[in-house]
Image (spheres, rainbow, N blue to C red):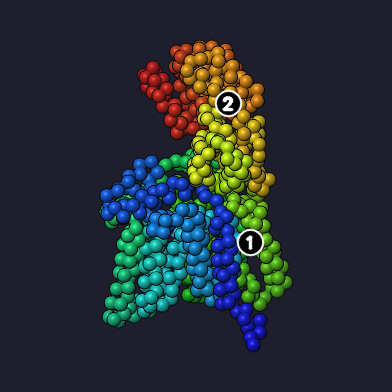
């Protein structure tokens, strides 16, 4: 009979960690939330699948002028659309979430194997798996993010096989060559940014030859070795590039120009997105250089930070000794973490949603942190320091574990304690940008409505929660403009409400019937409308019925005194009647609720224009442009003012 000590080997620990992770992922996949990106990319994936089924006749997937979807390989999204179509699966998003869980598990597998390759022990592999599961920003997106998570899996797999390829020189195994080619191909099939892996391979070859100059001499002087290695590198290039394009219709239209065009688009994404950063609303194309470093600082669990400090300390010590192969591969792994981060900061890439677009480097950072902690554990010296440090690391691991257990499926919204935690981040940084919090609210509201007919408004495009219910009609509206839409109940996430309104508590509707909290912060509210005086009043004003419309809106203000959109419509009505005194009064009252609301600037500029005060009108428009340089509604008036000023 085997003793427990013999059964609990390092390899078995790694297998056990993967098995436990698989069970957790399988258990959580049906319970996770659908995110807003899925409602954008999945319909496109169905168009891609139809492109293949129709032999290219349905070319709608090639024409995506608004969101640039044609530039994404999105092979995993396409796979889920194919599975759902082939097997006639009704719950399409459940397929996506199980698929996401599978690719996250592959990420754990490859990261664990890379840990073994780097540190020589499967104990490192097991710890890497556990640590990745306790990285909320990564684990929290395991199910619905079918781009960043699969891309990370391909990225870490390619690094694993690059390391093996370099270790096997001068005669790498053909299995390693094919696996490396396929890993690069898969990564490119998700996003063309995987081309960077070819550069990593070249950099690794140059580095290992500098470390071992005899390799170059042997390869060049041995014909069979030179021919074999050349053939292997060509195989990696061909497989890694062309196989990755097979499930990407736009790339197949021109296999050389379109992938490079896509790479350029991804590096400098032209679509600007509003971001809440450091307590301000900033467009993603205008974010400061420290946006990404600051997000890494705030969203990385403390135990990973501590382990990374250990890694850097040991790495620094190794520089005092002769350069070794071990040091080379540690530096190579560190390079694959740092280079993408430094590169996107240096070229000023259009980043948004925190570290989401850079999730692929997180597993490398976690792996290095685990390796640093493991080296401390193996130290024979400094016993007094070692045990407390490891115990402290273990305690720190409990922080993200508790967070994930309490906040699922909104566990990806995580800010570490040393940066002030979620309490301090709320209203200062992007919060639930995926709108995972809508799921629980939608479930409650469906039970509340029951069989009654109702119109439900939401400030996010997630109609999937209601689309199969014939008695519920879904409506989309911005939260502040909700009064202009006909609805009975509203589910509103607070993420994109202006920070100043959140901080001053001027955002709350008096008709909120239920609030959902996340770490003590308001996350989602359910609003029961009751009377529709606000909607009717706005409609009357549009029809030029000033008295009736204003009376209805004043009644609406009695119940919702903080509804800033009512002040906008009332002020607009007074402006149309040239009642400037009443207009100014309404404008001031509205700005007390929301000082930087764009419609107020536009109305004020229009007032000055109507009064033929063109210089004053231009000055207000300049203020508006400073607040929101992409406010398109100002375009017509700006053009007219410039014409009057001969600009």
Q: Position of residue 2 (x, y in %)?
A: 63, 86
Residue 176 is at least partly visible in this image: yes
Instruction: Name the quadrant of the N terminus.
Output: bottom right
Foreground of the two, 448 or 13: 448
Label 2: which residue? 532
Q: Position of residue 250 (x, y in %)?
A: 31, 52
Foreground of the two, 10 or 21: 21
Alpha-carbon neighbours of circle 2 within 10 Å: few (<14), some, or many (≥20)?
some
Foreground of the two, 604 or 190: 190
Secondary structure of the residue carrying numbered label 2: loop
Lateral position of residue 123 relative to residue 83, left or right? right
Residue 177: quadrant of the picture: bottom left
- Give above or below for 334 relative to 544: below
Label 1: which residue? 303
Foreground of the two, 460 or 53: 53
Q: Earlier in the sequence, mark 1 or mark 2?
A: 1
- Give above or below for 551 relative to 88: above
x 53%, y 14%: residue: 546
């Amino acid at each position: 009979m085997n003793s427990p000590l013999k059964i609990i080997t390092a390899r078995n620990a790694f297998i056990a960690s993967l098995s436990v992770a698989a069970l957790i992922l399988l258990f959580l996949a049906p319970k996770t939330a659908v995110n807003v990106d899925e409602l954008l990319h999945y319909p496109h994936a169905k168009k891609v699948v139809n492109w293949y089924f129709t032999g290219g006749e349905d070319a709608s997937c090639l024409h995506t002028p608004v969101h640039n979807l044609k530039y994404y390989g999105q092979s995993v999204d396409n796979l889920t659309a194919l599975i759902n179509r082939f097997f006639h699966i009704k719950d399409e998003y459940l397929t996506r979430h199980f698929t996401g869980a599978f690719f996250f598990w592959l990420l754990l597998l490859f990261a664990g194997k890379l840990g073994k390759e780097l540190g020589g022990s499967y104990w490192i592999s097991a710890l890497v798996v556990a640590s990745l599961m306790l990285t909320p920003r990564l684990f929290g997106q395991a199910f619905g993010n079918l781009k960043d998570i699969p891309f990370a899996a391909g990225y870490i797999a390619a690094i694993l096989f690059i390391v093996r390829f370099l270790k096997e020189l001068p005669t790498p195994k053909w299995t390693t060559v094919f696996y490396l080619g396929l890993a690069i191909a898969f990564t490119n099939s998700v996003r063309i940014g995987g081309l960077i892996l070819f550069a990593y391979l070249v950099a690794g070859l140059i580095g290992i030859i500098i470390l071992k100059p005899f390799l170059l001499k042997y390869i060049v002087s041995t014909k069979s070795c030179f021919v074999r290695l050349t053939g292997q590198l060509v195989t990696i290039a061909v497989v890694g590039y062309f196989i990755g394009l097979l499930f990407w219709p736009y790339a197949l239209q021109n296999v050389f120009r379109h992938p490079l065009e896509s790479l350029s688009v991804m590096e400098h994404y032209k679509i600007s997105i509003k971001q809440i950063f450091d307590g301000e609303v900033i467009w993603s194309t205008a974010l400061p250089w420290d946006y990404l470093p600051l997000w890494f600082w705030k969203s990385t669990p403390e135990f990973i930070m501590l382990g990374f400090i250990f890694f850097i300390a040991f790495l620094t010590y190794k520089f005092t000794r002769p350069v070794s192969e071990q040091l080379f591969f540690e530096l190579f792994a560190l390079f694959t973490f740092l280079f993408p981060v430094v590169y996107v900061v240096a070229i000023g890439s259009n980043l948004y949603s925190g570290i989401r677009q850079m999730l692929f480097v997180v597993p490398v950072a976690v792996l290095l942190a685990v390796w640093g902690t493991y080296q401390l554990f193996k130290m024979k010296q400094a016993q007094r320091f070692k045990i407390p440090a490891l115990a402290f690391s273990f305690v720190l691991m409990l922080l993200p574990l508790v967070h994930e257990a309490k906040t699922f499926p909104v566990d990806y919204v995580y800010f570490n304690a040393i940066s002030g935690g979620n309490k301090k981040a709320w209203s200062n940084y992007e919060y639930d940008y995926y709108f995972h919090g809508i799921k629980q609210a939608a479930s409650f509201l469906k039970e509340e409505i029951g069989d009654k007919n109702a119109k439900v408004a939401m400030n996010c495009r997630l109609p999937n929660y209601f689309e199969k219910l014939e008695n519920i009609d879904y409506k989309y509206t911005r939260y502040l403009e909700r009064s202009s839409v006909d609805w009975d109940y509203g589910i509103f996430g607070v993420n994109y409400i202006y920070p100043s309104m959140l901080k001053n508590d001027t955002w709350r509707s008096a008709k909120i019937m239920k609030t959902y909290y996340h770490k003590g912060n308001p996350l989602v509210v359910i609003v029961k409308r009751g009377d529709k005086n606000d909607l009717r009043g706005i409609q009357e004003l549009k029809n030029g019925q000033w008295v009736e419309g204003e009376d209805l809106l004043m009644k609406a203000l009695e119940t919702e005194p903080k509804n800033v959109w009512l002040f906008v419509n009332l002020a607009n009505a007074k402006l149309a009647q040239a009642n400037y005194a009443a207009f100014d009064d309404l404008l001031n009252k509205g700005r007390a609720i929301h000082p930087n609301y764009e419609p107020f600037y536009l109305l004020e500029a229009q007032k000055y224009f109507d009064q033929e005060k063109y210089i004053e009108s231009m000055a207000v428009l300049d203020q508006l442009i400073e607040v929101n340089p992409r406010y398109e509604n100002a375009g017509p008036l700006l053009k007219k003012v410039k014409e009057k000023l001969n600009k």
